[in-house]
Image (cartoon, rainbow, N blue to C red):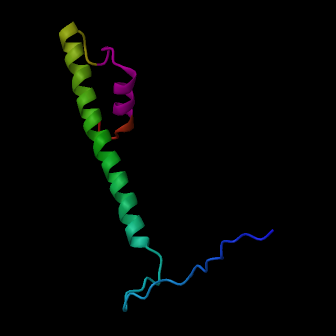
Amino acid sequence: MKSAVPHQVIETTTPNLDGFEITRRPLIGFGLLISSVIGTLAVLIFFGAWASSDRIENRALAAGISEIQGESEWWEDGLVFACPLH
């Protein structure tokens, strides 16, 4: 049996935007997005390593031992290791 619902025709053309037409890929936009993500991660790693370094040093000074022998958490060691400046 045939259905009583008529078939709809869907247009596949894009609307006319009076001269606004994108003809190339958005490489600049993707580049800016990726660079902002990398920059944000770099800043977070830098400040995280700075805070971790201070925490390790303060804990070692409070215990009366040298900074090299001080115990630290795994995430503190990871952040200090990930940052090439610390």
Q: Is residue 60 above or below residue 23?
A: above
Q: Nearest the camera: 66 or 42?
A: 42
- Seen at 35% across and 32% down, the residue is 79
Tell which residue pokes out farthest to the right in this image.
1
Q: Is residue 64 visible?
A: no
Where is the N terminus found, in terms of image quarters?
Answer: bottom right
Q: Quadrant of residue 65?
A: top left
Q: Is residue 10 above or below residue 68?
A: below
Q: Nearest the camera: 4 or 31?
A: 4
- Seen at 47% across and 84% down, the residue is 23
* x, y percent for residue 81: 38, 33
Q: Is residue 73 magenta?
A: yes
* x, y percent for residue 40: 31, 49
- Seen at 23% across and 15% down, the residue is 59
* x, y percent for residue 5: 66, 72
For the magenta stretch, what is the residue range?
68-81
Q: Is residue 76 above or below residue 27?
A: above
- Seen at 36% across and 53% down, the residue is 37
Classify residue 42 as left or right of residue 24.
left
